[in-house]
Amino acid sequence: MHTIVAISTALAPGGIGIVRLSGAESVNIVKKFFKSIDNQDLSEMKGYSAKLGKVFDGNEVVDQVIILFFRAPRSYTGENIVEISCHGGVYIAKKILSLALKNGAKLAEPGEFTKRAFLNGKIDLSKAESVANLISAHGEKANKLAISGLEGNINKKIKEIINFLTEIAANLSVWADYPEEDIPQFKENLLKKNLAEAKNKLLKISEKEKAIKALNEGLKISIVGRPNVGKSSLLNILTGYQRAIVSDIAGTTRDIVDGNTMIGEIPIKLFDTAGIRETSDSVEQIGVNMAKQNLHDTDIIFVLFDGSKKLTKEDIEVIKLVDKNKAIAIINKIDLGISIETEKIRKSFKKVVNISTIEELGIEKLKETVYDFVDMNSLNASEPFVTGQRQFEVVKRAISSIEETETAFNSGVTLDAVTVLVQNSIEILGEITGENVSEEIIDKIFSKFCVGK
């Protein structure tokens, strides 16, 4: 396998920059452009040791650097690793990278260092995904979730469930293959109990899907309503700057205006949409159509109403249009007094928040409601949970497989057939740890990593 190289720190001015190499030829490549102050041959360096010296491009000094050497197999990737810590200029890091490439290294693909760690048995696939989550963590809970995965907590839980299912399959095989032997009598109730227990274990480690996905992937929130209910003002307040034009003229917003913010530890992408109404203006109508389409592509919908006025036909149209399961009704302009039929709104929506964008009242309550919407406050990030869309989908398939097993057994199929179904659940769960996963999935997972990790 060829030796790879990449810049592992951000391409921006900083205190230090790190260029990392991994592979059998790491030391030999670095020797061609680095000289230590004591003139020691790098090949003689012990693992977990450092060396001060200079990087040269021919006879010209590029930088004074520190070399760190991690000897295989006791390294992150399981291969020889050399890390070059240079001064944090972008030019310097790029120059050292080019010298490494010039002398035989190949540019690493996204996530290739961690991919090699997985392929060399240093980490399992769930730990590798936790590395990516740790890098992208925006807050304490996301960090704790990633650390829990990196320490192998979800791996242990998955293996525990796999071992539990394996014992079920083994017992089934004995009962099916040797019915006349002197073995414990087959108990239907025990099998049903064990299958239910396995399913409950899987439900437990995946029960906080909404909260975990919000932490790791963020939320998309669309702000909708008829014209002039305060959609653009709300976007500006939540993002903290004048992102959208605010005007008393109906139909000001004709396109989708977006902005990024944080609500607590959750990354949020907000979409301010055109006011939904019937219009003869062809350009505004395009914006209205885009607003309606955007409703299907977001996680939460903020449905705004002007609380100082009675419900209009346009308000009713908006109420009919939105998916109530992902909607939060927001009654704005409460500083002007409430004239709107609040009981009608409360009958249509599970969550209703009163605010004033002018006086910035109720904004904290709205943020709390978003937290409550994804069940964030009840998430104990120290407990083992699967993370990421891929892992959640795997667990759902495993649960479906167990339910299929329960249905088949209750239908009177042979124990041989039941055993096959249990083994299918085991194989599915192996996709989380990487014991049973295709090369295509592996490549897809690591392609989402940054270069240099």
Image: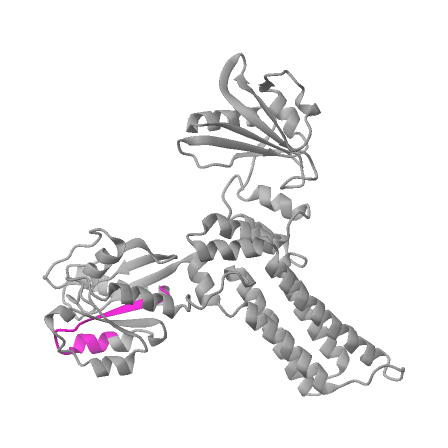
Q: Is residue 80 magenta?
A: no
Give me the residue at 49% from left, 43% from top: 450
Q: Position of residue 195 (x, y in %)?
A: 66, 78
Q: Is residue 444 visible?
A: no
Q: Which residues are magenta?
A: 298-318
| Residue 273 at x, y percent in the picture | 24, 62
In the foreground, 362 or 124: 362
Percent across and percent down for residue 3 are: 63, 33
Q: How is the image coloured?
A: one colour
**Where does the C terminus fall, quadrant-wise?**
top right
Say left or right for 321 vs 25: left
For residue 174, above or below residue 206:
below
Residue 302 on the magenta span: yes
Residue 268 located left or right of residue 70: left
Residue at (60, 59) in percent of width and height: 153
Observer-nearest of 39 and 93: 39
Residue sitting farthest toward the top: 59
Q: Is residue 192 left or right of residue 319?
A: right
Total number of numbered discs in the rendering? 0
The image quarter containing residue 272 is bottom left
Q: Which quadrant of the figure contains the N terminus?
A: top right
Q: Residue at x 68, y 39 (%)?
A: 74
Residue 383 on image: x %, y %: 54, 63
For residue 51, say whether it is visible: yes
Q: Name the residue at 61% across, 54% down.
A: 125
Outermost right residue: 181
